[in-house]
Image (cartoon, rainbow, N blue to C red):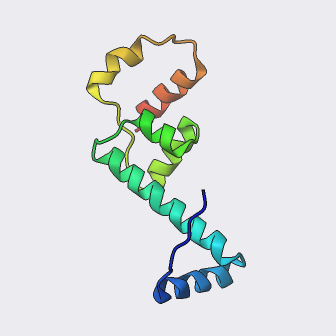
Amino acid sequence: MSITIDVPKNIDNILGLRSREEHIGRISVLKQMLWDGVKSYIVNQYSSGKISKGKLTELLDPDIYGVNEVLEKHQVRSIIATRDLPEALKLPKNQVNIEKSILHLTEC
């Protein structure tokens, strides 16, 4: 997707500053800042209970452990809704991902 926007002068100054500090182009800086804003918004939706962790994972498109890292970066604890627990317990116990999730839950 491609869009054209007018960038206010103060934001352009910030883009220039970060571009010089990180030795990357302004467009790359703008893309990074946009993505950071998107992650922040989606994590906020999750932490306020508006979307599930599955939807969070779908929207951010990392694996489940990548989502946990994003949540930690934004200082949001991963939760399992009580209503989802019986369904989660029906999954085969021999799946490595489930064992890792259970270990993560017991460490919290």
Q: Residue at x 35, y 31 (%)?
A: 80
Q: Residue at x 72, y 79 (%)?
A: 23
Residue 97 vertical position relative to residue 8 in the rendered view, above or below: above
Quadrant of the frame with the C terminus: top left
Residue 98, image x and y in percent? 52, 22
Quarter residue 96 falls in: top right
Q: How many marks?
A: 0
Q: Residue at x 58, y 17 (%)?
A: 95
Quarter residue 32 falls in: bottom right
Residue 84 vertical position relative to residue 73 in the rendered view, above or below: above
Q: Is residue 69 visible?
A: yes
Residue 80 vertical position relative to residue 68 in the rendered view, above or below: above
Q: Is residue 75 visible?
A: no
Residue 69, image x and y in percent? 52, 48
Residue 17, image x and y in percent? 59, 86
- Horizontally, residue 108 falls left or right of residue 17, namely left
Q: Residue at x 56, y 42 (%)?
A: 61
Quadrant of the frame with the N terminus: bottom right
- Horizontally, residue 102 falls left or right of residue 46, namely right
Residue 62, image x and y in percent? 58, 42
The foreground one among 39 and 65 is 39
The foreground one among 71 and 8 is 8
- Horizontally, residue 14 falls left or right of residue 43, namely right
